[in-house]
Amino acid sequence: MNTTSFTDILSQIADYKRVEVENRKKETSIKALQQKPFFERTCVSLKKAIADKQKNGIIAEFKRKSPSAGMINAKADVKQVTTGYAKAGVSGLSVLTDAPSFDGSLQDLLIARQYNQIPILRKDFMLDEYQVYEAKAFGADAILLIAAMIDKQTCEKLAHFAHKLGLQVLLEVHSESEISTHAGDYADIIGVNSRDLKSFSTDLSQAEKLYELLPGDQMKIAESGIHKPEDAVNFKKMGFDGFLIGSRFMQNDQPEKACRDFSHQLKKSSL
């Protein structure tokens, strides 16, 4: 597929996401979400886990497909993969819950929570406070907010609500303009996505270019396009605290093994 076919992908996603959220509101009330077992659970800090020197700084992602790559791993088992990630020493998990673009679900998040104690990021296209209620009810510890998709006012509103429920917030940016318009202390972590969500092209140099523009006192992670342990080591040397890695693991028949091997090599490269 050529990149021009993705020009309006975010607006298309936003359109179907709004409809999806409104439909889910009719199916499950906020009161019903508040009564789910995990809603009263105390969240685990993703920030502390990334900073923990006993971990490797990786947020390992579970996803079956993506808009840019299509189907990556249709047969992946969420329990097997996420528990394998945890055993590999990752700092946290990222679970895609969007169905049309990533073949994910809230059930994937629920299963990951049931079998893991480490922090979990609900990765989805967050537009509405209802989705924050869902994240808490299904066991997430943090949510993702995408600067390319929502304005700063909406980001701040959703972030403050997430904090009210005990969740942390990862703000994702890709450009100098997004840092300028969206950066703020309402985000617990700021992530630089090396993948342009408008064209879906990936350029690791983007994170390097933007690093100096990031708020100095915020935890920083690099996202997308990290295929070699050396990539992660280089980002660490720049000053990034952690990394979000998904496709590199999921494209393997045994994502958990790929993660374990990557983690081992990362440890050796860091010595």
Image (cartoon, helix red, strand yellow):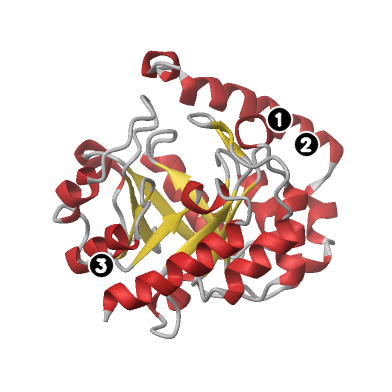
Closest to the camera, between mark 3 and mark 1, is 3
Q: Secondary structure at mark 2?
A: helix
The answer to whether any part of residue 240 appears in the image is yes
Q: Are marks 3 and 2 in contact (CB under 8 Å)?
A: no
Residue 264, percent from left and from top: 43, 74
**Which quadrant: the C terminus?**
bottom left
Mark 1 vs mark 2, CA separation in Å: 6 Å
Eyeballing the image, is 45 above or below 226?
Answer: below
Of residues 166 and 66, the one nearer the viewer is: 66
Q: Which residue is mark 3?
A: 236
The amino acid type of the residue labelled 1 equals Glu
Q: Secondary structure at mark 3?
A: helix
Q: Which residue is mark 1?
A: 20
**Which quadrant: the N terminus?**
top left
Looking at the image, tell me whether mark 3 or mark 1 is earlier in sequence order.
1
Q: Which mark is residue 211?
A: none
Mark 3 vs mark 2, CA separation in Å: 40 Å
User: As drawn, is 182 to the left or to the right of 111?
Assistant: left
Residue 24, percent from left and from top: 78, 36
Mark 3 vs mark 1, CA separation in Å: 38 Å
Eyeballing the image, is 114 above or below 66?
Answer: below
The amino acid type of the residue labelled 3 equals Lys
Q: Which residue is mark 2?
A: 24
Q: Residue at x 71, y 56 (%)?
A: 78
Q: Residues within 10 Å of mark 3 (few under 14, many from 20)?
A: some
The amino acid type of the residue labelled 2 equals Arg
Q: Residue at x 22, y 36 (%)?
A: 177
Q: Residue at x 79, y 54 (%)?
A: 33
Q: Secondary structure at mark 1?
A: helix
User: As drawn, is 137 to the left or to the right of 91?
Assistant: right
Q: Residues within 10 Å of mark 2 (few under 14, many from 20)?
A: some
